[in-house]
Image (tube, rainbow, N blue to C red):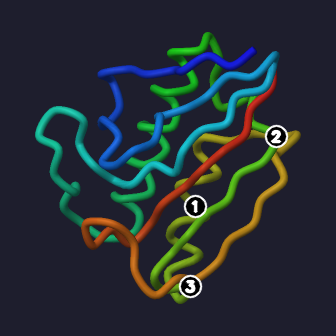
Amino acid sequence: MRKVIATSEAPAAVGPYSQAIAAGNTLYCAGQIPLDPVSNEIVSGGVAEQAKRVLENVGAVLKANGMDHGNVVKATVFMTDLAAFSEMNAVYGEFFHPPFPARSTVQVVALPRGAQVEIEVVAVS
C-alpha cells in the first residue's frame, strides 16, 4: 500500500511528483533543494547554508510521516561542485549521527532553480 506524504513545512513539489511516498515501513523522499518553504526562494549564502536548509526540508518531510533523521538508511547528495564537499559534509554531520546512513555523493552539471545542493533520502521505521 502506498501513501502520499506532504507537508507545508517543506517546499511544495515543483513538478509532477510527491514530496514523499510511504510504502509499508519505508519512506522514499524526493530530492529537496534549499528552498525556503515560506518564500519559495533559494536561501542566500553558500553550500553550508544551502545544505542546512535542504536538511531542514528533509526533516520536515520525515516528520510528516512520524520520522526523523535517525530513521534515514540511505542518502544521496547531489552537488554542483564537489570542491565544496567539506562544507556540505560538516553540516550533514550536524543532522546525522552514528550509525550513519549509507550515502552517495555525486557532482552534477546543474540542479533545479540554480541550487548547489540537493539531497534525497530513504527512511525506515
Query: Mark 1: which secondary structure?
Result: helix
Q: Percent x, y for residue 78? A: 56, 69
Classify 10 Å Cα crowding around label 1: few (below 14), some (14-19), many (20 and above). Answer: few
Assign the N terminus to one quadrant of the image.
top right
Residue 110 placement, left or right of 3: left
- Residue 90 marker: 1
Q: Amino acid at mark 2?
A: Val
Q: Nearer the viewer, residue 2 or 121?
A: 2
Q: Is residue 74 above or below residue 58?
A: below
The answer to whether the residue labelled 2 contacts the one labelled 3, judged by CB atoms less than 8 Å apart, is no
* Separation (CA) of disc 2 from disc 1: 19 Å
Query: Mark 3: which secondary structure?
Result: helix
Assign the C terminus to one quadrant of the image.
top right
Residue 76 placement, left or right of 26: left
Classify 10 Å Cα crowding around label 3: few (below 14), some (14-19), many (20 and above). Answer: some
Q: Is residue 15 above or below residue 2?
A: below
Residue that badge 2 annotates: 73
Mark before the other along the chain sequence, 1 or 3: 3
Q: Quadrant of residue 114?
A: bottom left
Mark before the other along the chain sequence, 2 or 3: 2
Mark before the other along the chain sequence, 2 or 1: 2
